[in-house]
C-alpha cells in the first residue's frame, strides 16, 4: 500500500513507481479510473452526455460512489444514448426510483431525461460536444497541491449559464468544472503526477 502523501503536495508514489494524487492512490477502482480515464478527451455526444449525467448524480456525493454504480447506471439509462433516454416517461422514472443499483434521486433522474431531450435539440445548432468544448480556456491550470485545484472557473460559470439557457438541469458551475476536468478540457492533474500532460490537449 502506498504511503499517504509520501511526496508532499498531495502526491503519492505507488508500489509501481507511478506518482498519483492521494485520492487515486489506494482504492483500485479510483486508481484505474485516474490512470486510464480521468482527464482524457471525450468529444462524442454519448460520452459527454453520460459524463454530464454522472457528474449531476455525483453532486453532494463521492465520485467513488458514482463510479461503483456506473455499470448499473448504464443499464438503467439505456447506455446513455440520448435518443433512447429522451423517450423515457413517468413509468421509467418510477422504475428508476425502484432501482437500488443507481442513486435514486427523483430530481436528478428527471434532469437526466430532460437533458437527453436538450442534447437532441442541440444537434441543430452544432451539438453538445461543440458547445461544451467551445468553453475550453486559453490556458490550463497547473496546480501543485490539492489546495490549488479550483472548484469553478469563468469558463465553467459561462458553460453552466449557457446549458441552463438551452434547457439543461443540474449543470451548476462546480459540476461543470468537474466535467471539464474529467473530459480533458482542463488538465488539473497535479504537477508531478504521472498523468500530467497525458491527454494530448495540453502540453504543460
Image (cartoon, helix red, strand yellow):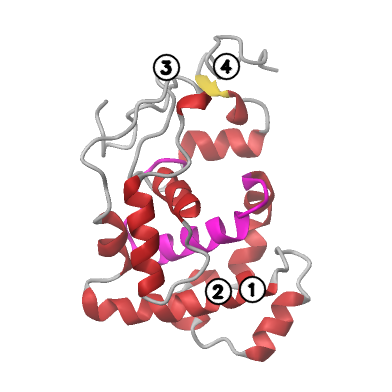
The answer to whether residue 129 is magenta is no
Instruction: Estimate the x, y position of residue 109 in percent, counting from the top left.
Output: 62, 73
Instruction: Estimate the x, y position of residue 4 in percent, counting from the top left.
Output: 67, 16
Residue that carries the numbered disc 2 in the rendered image:
111
Label 4: element kind? strand
At 48% across and 41% down in the image, what residue appears? 151
Residue numbers of the magenta segment: 38-63
Instruction: Estimate the x, y position of residue 94 in percent, counting from the top left.
Output: 73, 83
- How many angstroms separate mark 3 from mark 4 (CA)? 10 Å
Label 2: element kind? helix
- How many angstroms separate mark 3 from mark 1 (CA)? 39 Å
- How many angstroms separate mark 1 from mark 4 (CA)? 38 Å
- How many angstroms separate mark 1 from mark 2 (CA)? 6 Å
At 74% across and 64% down in the image, what residue appears? 101
The answer to whether residue 49 is magenta is yes
- How many angstroms separate mark 4 from mark 2 (CA)? 37 Å
Quarter of the image where the N terminus is located: top right
At 50% across and 18% down in the image, what residue appears? 18
- Mark 2 neighbour class, 10 Å CA radius: few under 14, some 14 to 19, many 20 or more: many
Label 3: element kind? loop
Sooner in the amino-acid sequence: mark 3 or mark 1: 1
The mark closer to the camera, 1 or 4, is 1
At 27% across and 36% down in the image, what residue appears? 200
Residue that carries the numbered disc 1 in the rendered image:
107
Check if mark 1's residue and mark 2's residue have beta carbons within 8 Å: yes
In the rendered image of this protein, does residue 53 appear above or below residue 133? below
Sooner in the amino-acid sequence: mark 3 or mark 4: 4
The mark closer to the camera, 2 or 3, is 2
Amino acid at each position: 500500500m502506498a504511503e499517504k502523501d509520501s511526496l508532499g503536495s498531495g502526491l503519492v508514489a505507488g508500489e509501481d513507481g507511478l506518482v498519483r494524487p492521494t485520492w487515486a492512490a489506494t482504492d483500485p477502482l479510483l486508481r484505474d479510473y485516474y490512470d486510464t480515464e480521468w482527464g482524457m478527451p471525450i468529444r462524442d455526444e454519448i460520452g459527454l452526455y453520460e459524463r454530464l449525467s454522472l457528474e449531476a448524480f455525483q453532486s453532494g456525493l463521492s465520485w467513488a460512489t458514482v463510479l461503483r454504480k456506473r455499470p448499473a447506471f448504464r443499464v438503467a439509462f439505456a447506455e446513455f444514448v440520448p435518443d433512447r433516454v429522451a423517450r423515457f416517461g413517468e413509468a421509467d422514472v418510477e422504475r428508476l426510483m425502484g432501482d437500488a443499483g443507481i442513486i435514486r434521486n427523483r430530481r436528478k433522474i428527471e434532469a437526466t431525461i430532460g437533458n437527453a431531450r436538450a442534447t437532441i435539440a442541440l444537434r441543430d445548432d452544432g451539438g453538445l460536444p461543440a458547445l461544451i468544448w467551445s468553453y475550453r480556456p486559453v490556458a490550463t491550470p497547473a496546480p501543485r497541491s490539492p489546495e490549488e485545484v479550483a472548484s469553478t472557473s469563468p469558463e465553467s460559470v459561462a458553460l453552466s449559464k449557457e446549458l441552463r439557457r438551452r434547457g439543461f438541469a443540474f449543470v451548476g458551475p462546480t459540476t461543470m468544472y468537474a466535467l471539464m476536468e474529467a473530459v480533458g478540457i482542463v488538465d488539473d492533474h497535479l504537477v508531478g503526477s504521472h498523468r500530467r500532460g497525458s491527454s494530448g490537449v495540453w502540453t504543460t
